[in-house]
Image (cartoon, rainbow, N blue to C red):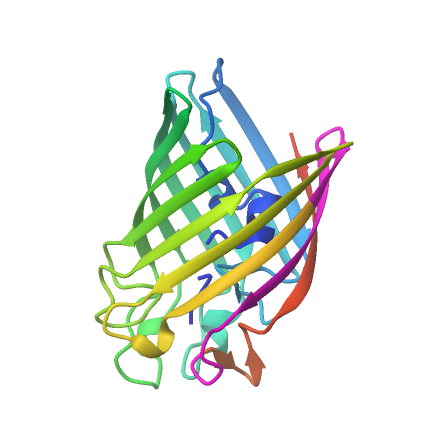
Amino acid sequence: MKKILVPSLIALALGSVSGLAQAQAVAPESSLSFNVGAVSDYRYRGLSQSRLQPALQGGMDYADKSGFYVGAWGSTIKWIKDTPGVTKGTTELDLYAGYKGAVGDVAYDVGLLSYVYSGNNYGDASAGGTKNANTNEAYAALTLGPVTAKYSHAYSDLFGNADTKNSYYLDLSALFDLGNGYSLTPHVGYQKFKNLAVATYTDYSLTLAKDLGNGLSASAALVGTDADKGFYTLKDKFNGKSGVTVGLKYAF
């Protein structure tokens, strides 16, 4: 497509890299954590990465007490193989590293992120002008109270679209504690594709998450976009259609 491709809010609630990249206060101690989960539809920046079908996900993170962190997160996907002429590319692996800190009441998070689609032959697609789908971005986020603003800048072509280097994504979201383990996250994002106006779009979502205890959490999200239906339709599925997704995650 791509791809979601803001953090898509469902991804945020379930601990995808999008959620991991949000600025937070630095933890007082170093930590190593893991997570596994499943979603009814993997949405990223509003767009389905899994043809509106379920996906399996998991990751690991190391956060140093100094504020530096590294991590990896992966998911099953279908959008690459759904592209005409492409036969390889069924997984996404996000590799990231950054630094979190705070100045007064403002927390910040800066880092680098690589989306790796192992073995993909997206550059061999029959529709000319495409390249390898692997993508590299730099990001910076600021958090004040419940609100986070984030900017992501692609320093490679974006998700296999030729001549789209220097595309960017703007994300504004908030996290509200509702009590009793519930949280609500509204989100709006804007994906700008350089030299590819038809691919540019806005996405939005509203995610309700529930901490079930013992590392288990569940979420439900209403997700939608104004993405171009023709550009983002693969195998007769419009990956930007509005819908509700649910997920379950275990962190340990």
Magenta stretch in the rendered image:
209-231
Q: Can residue 53 be seen in this view?
A: no
Residue 177 screen position, x and y as percent: 66, 34
Q: Relative to the observer, which residue lies in front, 186 or 54?
A: 186
Left/right placement of residue 47 relative to residue 115 reads right
Q: Residue at x 24, y 58 (%)?
A: 156
Residue 94 screen position, x and y as percent: 43, 48
Dividing the picture into quarters, in which one does residue 77 lie? bottom right
Is 53 rendered above or below residue 112?
below
Q: Residue at x 43, y 34 (%)?
A: 143
Residue 68 screen position, x and y as percent: 36, 25
Is 176 rendered above or below residue 239?
above
Is 82 rendered above or below residue 202?
below
Q: Please identify the quadrant where the N terminus is shown.
A: bottom left
Is 120 rendered above or below residue 142?
below
Dividing the picture into quarters, in which one does residue 200 lie? bottom left
Q: Relative to the observer, which residue lies in front, 215 or 179?
A: 179
Question: Does residue 222 show up magenta in the picture?
Answer: yes
Question: Does residue 219 show up magenta in the picture?
Answer: yes
- Spot the residue most to the top: 28
Residue 197 screen position, x and y as percent: 30, 76
